[in-house]
Image (cartoon, rainbow, N blue to C red):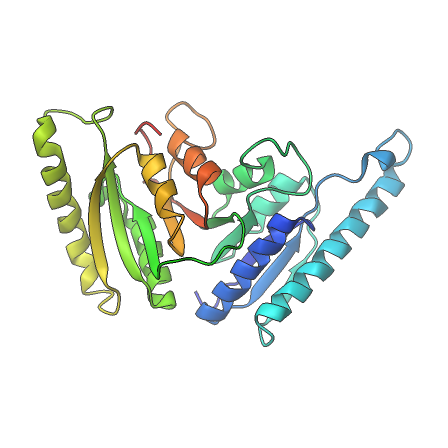
């Protein structure tokens, strides 16, 4: 991770400045450079009229410059010696933000941008980046400090969660935190030919087995497992209230949407940072 930057997308919003703080701390922990990408929302409506393309472009550049300046100042206040780099991408904000993660170790975004529908729990640019970026994406909501020195990873199937689990262990190691692997179950999605009374014990055994191979790779990390009765999204959102980071896997939604119901629900209702790790595996078919 030390050779690739931690990228953070900013647009001048309060949410994106919270993302800068989280990204700066994380870059410092990993000894990585911080790359700040200014991808503001559309220019003010006063400029967006026919025949004023140049004025609109200038307004957007002004927004980007102010957002970049504020973000640099916030990052320096968090980590004065950090190697800070900047970028001003062109193109639509959703594509530009997602592209910022192409060669990054992590892409950090705020839950909301400066524009868009504030009534929504998750911004459209953030949703697009989470679904399409090539690297893990961390969505930061607010700046309340974590109450527990803990990284939580949601595990649906231990044999199919290596990407998310590896990322979670790396973050736990860097932060000196414990890792809690969580499997949530409910009668709504219980499979298959396992009697209801046996489901928790079976899940606990499978989860413990899947974690065994990782203990030797990360001896410095205390690894715990928990099987919890409840809907997956609700359970993981509850962990986000106190954990330093909650980690999910990313895979295609069964119905073709960019985000699965679980991913969208956790990101919308989390109280702390949530990482979504790309890969062919992840939390997919369970009810939110």
Residue in the image at 50% along x and 55% along y: 144
Q: How many marks?
A: 0
Identify the residue at the far bottom of this view.
81
> Residue 127's x, y, as percent?
53, 37
Answer left or right for 198 relative to 249: left
Is 44 in front, or is 158? 44
Quarter of the image with the C terminus in it: top left
Vertical side of 190 occupied by 111: above or below: below
| The N terminus lies in quadrant | bottom left
Pick whichever, 285 or 278, lies toward us.
Answer: 285
- Using residue 112 as the reference point, say whether residue 179 is left or right of it: left
**Residue at x 86%, y 35% (from the top left corner):** 46
Q: Position of residue 107 (x, y in %)?
A: 52, 53
Residue located farthest toward the right when viewing the structure as drawn:
51
Residue at position x 17%, y 26% from top? 191
Q: Please tell me whether residue 275 is drawn above or below residue 195 in the rendered image.
A: below
Would you say residue 84 is visible in this rendering? no
- Seen at 59% across and 35% down, the residue is 124
Q: Position of residue 129 (x, y in %)?
A: 54, 42
Between 155 and 184, the one lying in front of the other is 184
- Give how far across and how far down residue 205 sits, in percent: 11, 45
- Using residue 122 as the reference point, say whether residue 148 is left or right of it: left
Tell which of 232 and 158 is nearer to you: 232
Q: Quadrant of residue 146?
A: bottom left
Can I make out residue 73 in this image?
A: yes
């Amino acid at each position: 991770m030390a050779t690739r930057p931690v990228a953070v997308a900013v647009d001048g919003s309060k949410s994106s400045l919270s993302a800068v703080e989280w990204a700066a701390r994380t870059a410092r922990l990993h000894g990585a450079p911080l790359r700040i990408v200014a991808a503001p929302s559309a220019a003010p409506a006063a400029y967006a009229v026919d025949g004023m393309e140049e004025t609109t472009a200038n307004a957007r550049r002004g927004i980007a410059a102010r957002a970049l300046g504020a973000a640099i100042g916030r990052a320096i206040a968090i980590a004065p010696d950090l190697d800070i780099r900047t970028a001003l991408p062109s193109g639509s904000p959703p594509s530009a933000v997602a592209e910022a993660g192409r060669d990054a170790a992590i892409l950090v975004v705020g839950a909301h941008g400066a524009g868009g529908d504030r009534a929504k729990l998750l911004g459209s640019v953030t949703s697009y980046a989470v679904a399409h970026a090539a690297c893990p994406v961390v969505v930061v909501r607010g700046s309340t400090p974590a109450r527990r020195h803990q990284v939580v990873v949601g595990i649906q199937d231990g044999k199919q969660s290596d990407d998310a689990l590896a990322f979670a262990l790396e973050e736990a190691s860097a932060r000196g935190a414990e890792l809690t692997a969580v499997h949530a179950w409910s009668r709504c999605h219980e499979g298959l030919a396992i009697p209801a009374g046996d489901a928790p014990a079976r899940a606990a055994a499978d989860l413990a087995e899947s974690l065994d191979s990782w203990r030797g790779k990360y001896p410095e990390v205390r690894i715990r497992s928990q099987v919890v009765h409840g809907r997956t999204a609700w359970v993981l959102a509850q962990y986000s209230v106190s954990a330093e980071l909650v980690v999910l896997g990313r895979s295609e939604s069964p119905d073709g949407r960019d985000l699965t119901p679980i991913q969208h629900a956790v990101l919308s209702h989390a109280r702390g940072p949530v990482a979504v790790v790309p890969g062919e595996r992840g939390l997919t078919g369970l009810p939110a």
